[in-house]
Image (cartoon, grey):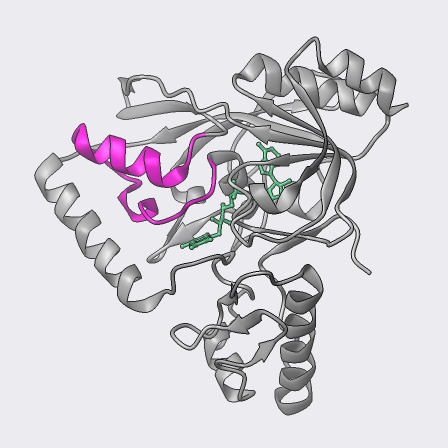
């Protein structure tokens, strides 16, 4: 089955077998993908997605891999590395400026490029390393804003290759979730997004971005991680619960709850998905026992775990 699929995919884009996914995720952990394709444009992204679906194998799209924990056993199926990062010129449609961008473009890059060109509306996303496709799936956000506030439409293909436009309501964008994440939309891939902008002043926007950068630098660790591990429960920040459980700085194998920000888990070098999973489960158990609160991971678990 994989030989036939591989041959068909190779007519769309180069195919790699047994590609270690640790190279493609910000956590730096995870086993190999049976088949791995880098899609450089929308045609390749859509073509590879539909081909994988037609062959009935599990198909995963990775944007920046900044919100996934891949199991040590890797992925039995096809991984599409989304490099479709085209960006159009901002244009007016009578109700204000907007921009269209490929789903593989990083949200941070979009925010910074637009700020340099004097367009605001997404400057708060300057530190979100994920792709716009990933941002749709998680309704990525920061500093009280999220994609939901600015998304005009996202263009998606379904498993059969039919392309349709969806609004933020259609996609049920909510705090770190969407109909794509909950599975209610079925198998779909985000191809591109249109985002609402405001005309602004480039110097002022760049200053705002510098302020956000400084805030992140002082509050968040660098190194291999996936950003926030848990979603914030309604009453207080997730890091406060991790602290309350006494787990700031706690280490299992080569994974550690960060000393600087206890809702981040760091791969100290050579961590396994197992180390990280054990830390996540330990925090969930302790917090459940102490407070009754169920901590929901923000990071998506994909592939084979022990
Ligand atoms: C240092 C750091 C800081 C972060 N800060 C923030 C922050 O401030 N706010 C925030 O919200 N998040 C933050 N994150 C998390 C992450 O950047 C976001 O969740 C981001 O939206 C994930 O995008 P991605 O491209 O990396 O998705 P991936 O990790 O590649 O994928 C995540 C999920 O989306 C699916 N997916 C990805 N692209 C597509 C597509 N085109 N079509 C269909 N499905 C797709 C994947 O299959 C997977 O299920 C941070 C992460 C790091 C490492």
Instruction: Please provide percent x and percent y for residue 93.
Output: 31, 17
Furthest toward the right, the residue is: 1
- Considering only vertical position in the picture, is 141 above or below 193? below
Q: Position of residue 108 (x, y in %)?
A: 35, 41
Q: Judge left or right: residue 193 versus residue 119.
A: right
The quarter holding residue 296 reads: bottom right
Query: Can the viewer see residue 163 in this picture?
Result: no
How far across and how far down the image is residue 92, in percent? Answer: 27, 18
Q: Quadrant of the C terminus?
A: bottom right
| Residue located farthest toward the front when viewing the structure as drawn | 270
What's the magenta region? 105-131
* Residue in front for this viewpoint, 47 or 172: 47
Q: Nearer the viewer, residue 253 or 178?
A: 253
Whether 117 is among the magenta residues is yes
Q: Residue furthest top?
A: 11
Q: What residue is at 28 percent from the left and 61 percent from the top?
A: 217
Q: Is residue 178 visible?
A: yes
At x 38%, y 65%, the residue is: 221
Residue 186 pos. (x, y %): 75, 35
Q: Which of the two residues, 167 or 104, is positioned nearer the viewer here?
A: 104
The quadrant in which residue 245 appears is bottom right
Identify the residue at horizontal 51%, vertical 40% (top origin): 64
Is 207 on the left or on the right of 192, as rendered? Answer: left
Residue 234 located left or right of residue 98: right
Classify the position of the N terminus by image quarter. Answer: top right
Q: Quadrant of residue 144?
A: bottom left
**14 and 65: which is toward the camera:** 14
Task: Say if 182 sits above or below 76 in the image.
Answer: below
């Amino acid at each position: 089955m994989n030989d036939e699929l591989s041959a068909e995919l190779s007519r769309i884009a180069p195919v790699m077998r047994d590609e270690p996914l640790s190279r493609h995720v910000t956590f730096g952990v995870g086993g190999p993908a049976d088949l791995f394709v880098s899609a450089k444009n929308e045609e390749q992204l859509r073509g590879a997605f539909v081909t994988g679906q037609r062959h009935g194998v599990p198909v995963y799209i990775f944007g920046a891999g900044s919100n996934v924990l891949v199991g040590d056993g890797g992925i039995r199926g096809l991984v599409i590395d989304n490099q479709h990062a085209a960006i159009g010129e901002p244009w007016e449609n009578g109700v204000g400026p907007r921009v269209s961008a490929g789903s593989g473009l990083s949200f941070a890059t979009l925010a910074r490029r637009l700020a340099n060109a004097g367009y605001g509306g997404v400057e708060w996303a300057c530190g979100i390393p994920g792709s716009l496709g990933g941002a749709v799936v998680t309704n990525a956000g920061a500093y009280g804003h999220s994609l939901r506030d600015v998304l005009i439409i996202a263009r998606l293909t379904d498993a059969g290759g039919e392309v349709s436009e969806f609004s933020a309501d259609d996609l049920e964008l909510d705090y770190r979730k969407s109909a794509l994440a909950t599975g209610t939309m079925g198998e779909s891939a985000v191809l591109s997004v249109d985002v609402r902008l405001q005309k602004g002043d480039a110097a002022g926007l760049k200053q705002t971005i510098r302020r956000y950068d400084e805030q992140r630098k002082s509050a968040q660790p660098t190194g291999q991680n996936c950003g926030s591990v848990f979603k914030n429960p309604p009453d207080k920040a997730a890091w406060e619960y991790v602290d309350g459980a006494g787990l700031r700085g706690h280490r299992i194998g080569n994974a550690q709850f960060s000393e600087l920000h206890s809702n981040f888990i760091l791969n100290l070098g050579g961590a396994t998905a197992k180390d990280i999973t054990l830390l996540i489960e330990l925090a969930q158990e302790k917090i459940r026992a102490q407070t009754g609160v169920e901590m929901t991971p923000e990071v998506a678990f994909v592939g084979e775990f022990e």
